[in-house]
Structure formats: structure tokens, C-alpha cells
Amino acid sequence: MLALMAPGLLFFVVFFYVPMLGNIVAFEDYQPFIGFKDSALVGLANFQELFVDPAFWESVRNTLSFAALQLIFFFPAPLALALLLNSLVSSRVKKFVQSVVYLPHFISWVLVVALFQQVLGGAGLISNFLRDHGLSALDVMTDPSTFPLLITSQVIWKDVGWGMIIYLAALANVDQSLYESAAVDGAGRWRRMWHVTLPAVRGVTIMLLVLRLGDVLSVGFEQFLLQRDAVGARAAEVLDTYVYYHGVVYGDWGVGAAAGLVKGIVGALMIWGANKIAHAFGEQGVYSK
Amino acid sequence: MTFSLPLLKPGPEDARPAWEEEPTRLGKSAKAVVLTVVCAVMILPFLTVLSTSLASREQITAAGGFVLFPTDPTFEAYTTILSGGLVTRAVLVSIGITVVGTTLSLLTTIGLAYALSKRGVPGSKPILLMVLFTLLFAPGMIPMYVLVKELGLRDSYWSLILPGLVNAFNLVVMRAFFMNIPEELYQAARIDGAGDWRILTRIVIPLSKGVIAVVGLFYAVTYWNAFFNAMLYLDDSGKWPIQVVLRSYVVQGKAITGDQLGVTHMAPAQSISMAVVMLALLPILLLFPFLQKYFSKGVLTGAIKG
């Protein structure tokens, strides 16, 4: 038994708990060639530097505004699509649409960005078409002012189908006789949706909403990393890219680690708080009590 | 923990129930339009890429870069990038990482999940809490980078496998599945004198093929799609997996030369770029029917619901 569990256990210790202690870098003037054991401790200096850095606060603002956009536009999309699919009669059409919308979930962000570039980029399909017809080309892939919309539509494109699965499961569990009795009592399709369908997905919606709120500091790292060059740091810097650029790229290791630690701690507290709220609503959350 | 999606099974629900009113013509057409647009938006990018990768030089020049239907399909772009050189090597690296990584991840996950699924294994409760805590707090990019560097794993393929070897969520899913195996089976095996290893290989694994397949597919997709680890830990561009190559030469638009591809005669640059995109996509397309099969079985739905 010990031999069976040892590799997994070793993994969690070495690649989780050791780097957790490695957050000591956030309190050091870390120099890669000296190593973290011998780098000088500087107390909270990295955090002081971090909290007066306008670029850090900009990345916080960007993170929160991207998260807000996702909440408004992405969050309801899977539910809307699930309701639409659920209202169809033909199972073949349902099955076809499901296959199509699930696919983008499984492709990498590099591919998503490449595909968007091929269609929407300055040398892409739509720009070519516009140019051929004497119109000016699109530049949505490089325009900082429309970048929030681009990011949000990429998230919707990639994950609307995936997000839909859990709603479809909840809808499939609705007792069909409820609809019949409602119809017999004279409820039309909208009243049936209001009184039967929506209550059936209420629980799962609240749970997902609370979880999303708890995870508000994570808006997707690779998506921003891949497109930061095209639109500039002011538009695309989020907390995770701040950590990467300030820590690894600019070599300001201590400040980067400090930003990562702040994000980790605030994020963990928020998930924990979100679960408390989920429990208060009588829902399960990520972990049960 | 598993429940199926009846939506996916063709069956009696194909008929509209008697009590349900016939939808209005406007409602019907609105739904048809919305669903058609949604499907077109999802499929169009894939179609453009596939067509352009197969298009001939003349057609690409005539169309100004993109082609929706190749009139005269050619595999020239694929033979160019697969004739040795940069892209071929990147594909082989990605395949190697995916195969080795998925195998090791599955073995490690199964072992720990099995140990944690049994009652009376000493220390299993604190270990489980230790695993669950990783879902709440991530150690952070900088400490991970420092660790990988101090372990001497920089520029090693192990840096693409070891840091993500076990996913706590996959572990929890698998453990939940193992716990649903009836206790009597274990007792019967024990009476017959079977040890943990025999119980695992003869009873638990054969009964859990579905969940092992799902978790394995998830690991495989994650390894294949991994991009940032390679960018962070590999300086040597000769070791790059396909996603990093895709980023440099397609997203960032660096030109690939015939030299790098090991050829003297090149297909049009645009077809080559799109063929690289297709290669990065192909394994996902091949796995997709299996991924979908498990949605319809409801295994994943149960897993997502936790």
C-alpha cells in the first residue's frame, strides 16, 4: 500500500508544499545565481515596493474589469444555450449542436488565439474580404480599446458548450410530469419555463455564480500572455501576467513572488468565503462541510 | 455520482408530447437562425484553417490568403513540415511528452486514489486534506520556477511532466469512483488471499475502466495543450513542443525558413502556417469522439458536479 501511494504523496510534497515554503522568495532579495538559501532576507520590502507600483494596481484593475465582463456576458451564455437546446424536440439536432459547441473547450489557448487571428486579424479572412470590397481592414486583434470585448468573446467561444453540460444535466433531471400538469393547468410555455424549468437550474446557477465570484482574481493566464504583445501591457496586464513579467522577465523576483503570494492568499480566502456563502444557500460548493 | 444525459439518446422524446403546444413559426425560425449562427461561428475557423492548409499556391494567391474550399487540394504543406526539421521534431516531442506524461500521471493517480479510497489506511485522512488543500491555494509561479531550477530540471523534458503530474481534481474523481466499488468484493478477495496489488490490478482497475479512460483523456489533452511550462522552463528551442512552435511561427508570425524545416522547396507560407495549426489540432480531433462518449455516459457530468 505504501508503495502505491508513495509517488503521489511525494509529488504533492515536492511540487506543492516545497514551493509553498519557497514563497520565502517574496521576503528576499532573490538572486538566481546565489539561490534562495543564500539570498538576503529583506522583510516586507518587496511588498512595499509592490503596493506603490502603479503597474500592479493597473493589473488588479484590469483583472477585476475582465472578471466583471465575463460575469455579465459569459456567465449567462451557457444557461441560455442550454435552455434553447432543451426546448428542441429533435434529439439529432441537439446531439449535433452539442458536438459542435463542446469541441473548442479541448483546444489550447495558443490554438484559440491562432484561430481568432486567422479569422479576425489584420491579414485574416474577414479583413481580406473587406479589403476586396473596398472597405478598411479590421484590427480587433491589436486594438487595446476593443480588447476586453475580444477577450470575452474568446472565452464565450471556447467554453460556452462546456459550461452548458452541467445545466443540461440539471434540466434532464426535471420530472417531465411537472410540465404536463402545468400545461393541463393552463400554463403557457413561458410560464412553464418560469415556474418549472428555471427553479430546476436555480441551485446549480447559484453554486456556479458563487464559485465564479470566489475565483474572481483568475481570469485566464495564457489567454492574456499570448495577446499582451499585440495590444500592449496597459490593456492586457492581469495579475498573473504581472507576476510573470516582473518576476521572470524583468528579473524582479522578489516583487513578482510577492504579487503571486498576495494573489494566492486573497484568492484562497475568497474561495473559502464563497463556499461559506454557498453553504448558507444550502448548496454544496467545491467542498462540503 | 453518475447520471446520464437522456438528451443524447435518440428515443421517445423525439415526439412532441400531446400537451405541448406547437411552437409559433417565428419562434421556430428564431431558434433555427440562432443555432445555425452558433454552429457556423464554432466551425468556420476550423474550416478556413483546414482548407487553407490544403489549398494550392495558385488558389491562395488568387484568394489573397484564405480559402474556404480548396478546389485543387494538395498535401504539399504537410509533406513540407513533416519532412524532418523544426515542426516534425516539435510534434514528436509533444507526442512523447503526452504519452509518457499520461502514463505516469495515471499510474500515480490510481495508486494514491486507491490508497485514499480504503478505510483504515494509516494517515489517509490527513493526506486527503493535504490533497484537497491544493485545490484552494496555488504555490505560485515564481516559487515553482525556483524549485524547477534548483532541482536541475530546466531544459529537461521532465520539467513539462513532473510539475503537473497529479491533478488533485482528477484524484478526487477517481477516489470517489473507487469508493463506490462494493466492499464485499474486497472482502471476498482478501479471504482468497489477495494482497493490495492483486486487488488493485484484478478488481479495482477492471471495474473502473470508464473513469480511468476519462481521467487519462484529461491528462492527455492537458499535456498536449501545455504551452506555458515549456515557455518558462525550456530555453533550448530545439526541445520545444508543438504549442510553443505554433505560438512563435503562427501567432507571433516569425517566418519559418526552408532551412529550419530541412527542405529546399517550400509550400506557400500561409499553407504551412495553417498546416502547423492543423497538426496541433489533430490529436484533439482524434480524441474528441472518446471525450464525447464519456459525456454521454454521464461520467463527466457526475465528475463535474463532484
Image: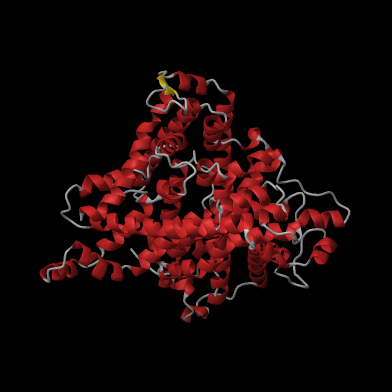
Residue A226 in picture, x, y percent from top left: 61, 44
Percent x, y of residue A13 = 31, 42
* Residue A155 visible in rendering: no
State the count of labels: 0
As drawn, is B262 to the left or to the right of B57?
left
* Residue lying furthest left: B191
The quarter of the picture where residue A176 lies is: bottom left
Which residue appears at 21% of the width and 66% of the height? Answer: B199
- Residue B102 lies, in percent from the top left, at 42, 58
Q: Position of residue B160 (x, y in %)?
A: 46, 48
Q: Quadrant of residue A27?
A: top left
Relative to B247, is B93 on the left or the right? left
Seen at 65% across and 36% down, the residue is A235
Q: Nearer the viewer, residue A123 or A127?
A: A123
Classify A32 as above or below A110: above
A89 or B204, which lies in front? B204
Left or right relative to B30: residue A35: left
**Model colouring:** secondary structure
Relative to B274, residue A57 above or below: above
Name the residue rendered at 36%, 59% in the picture: B106
Q: Between B143 and B1, which is closer to the camera in this rendering? A: B143
Q: Quadrant of the N terminus of chain B?
A: bottom left
On screen, residue B143 versus residue B65, left or right, reads: left
Tell me the quarter of the image containing the C terminus of chain B. Answer: bottom left
Using the rendered image of the protein, determine whether residue A109 is visible from the camera's viewpoint.
yes
